[in-house]
Image (cartoon, rainbow, N blue to C red):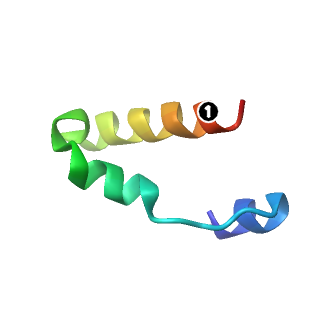
């Protein structure tokens, strides 16, 4: 994350971690958590 943030001028944040705690049903397994993280990252990169 730090490398991507540095390369893109962004800031490594804690949003992905916070998102998990805000809605644990969407991330009740590692696979679901990663799927949701990837969806979120893809959406903000558009």
Judged from the image, the secondary structure of the residue bearing numbered disc 1 is helix
Q: Nearer the viewer, residue 27 or 45?
A: 45
In which quarter of the view is residue 10 placed?
bottom right
The relative height of residue 23 versus residue 15 in the rendered view (above or below) is above
The quarter of the rendered structure image containing the N terminus is: bottom right
User: Whole-percent x and y of residue 12?
Assistant: 60, 67
Direction from residue 21 to residue 1 in the image, left or right? right
Q: Residue at x 72, y 29 (%)?
A: 46
Direction from residue 12 to residue 3 in the image, left or right? right
Q: Residue at x 81, y 57 (%)?
A: 8
Task: Name the residue carrying label 1.
Answer: 42
Direction from residue 19 to residue 3 in the image, left or right? right
The relative height of residue 6 versus residue 27 in the rendered view (above or below) is below
The relative height of residue 36 versus residue 9 in the rendered view (above or below) is above
User: Whole-percent x and y of residue 4?
Assistant: 73, 59
User: Whole-percent x and y of residue 43?
Assistant: 60, 31
Q: Nearer the viewer, residue 19 or 27?
A: 19
């Amino acid at each position: 994350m730090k490398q991507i943030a540095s390369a893109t001028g962004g800031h490594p944040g804690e949003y992905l971690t916070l998102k998990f705690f805000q809605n644990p049903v969407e991330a009740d397994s590692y696979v679901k958590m990663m799927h949701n993280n990837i969806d979120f990252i893809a959406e903000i990169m558009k």
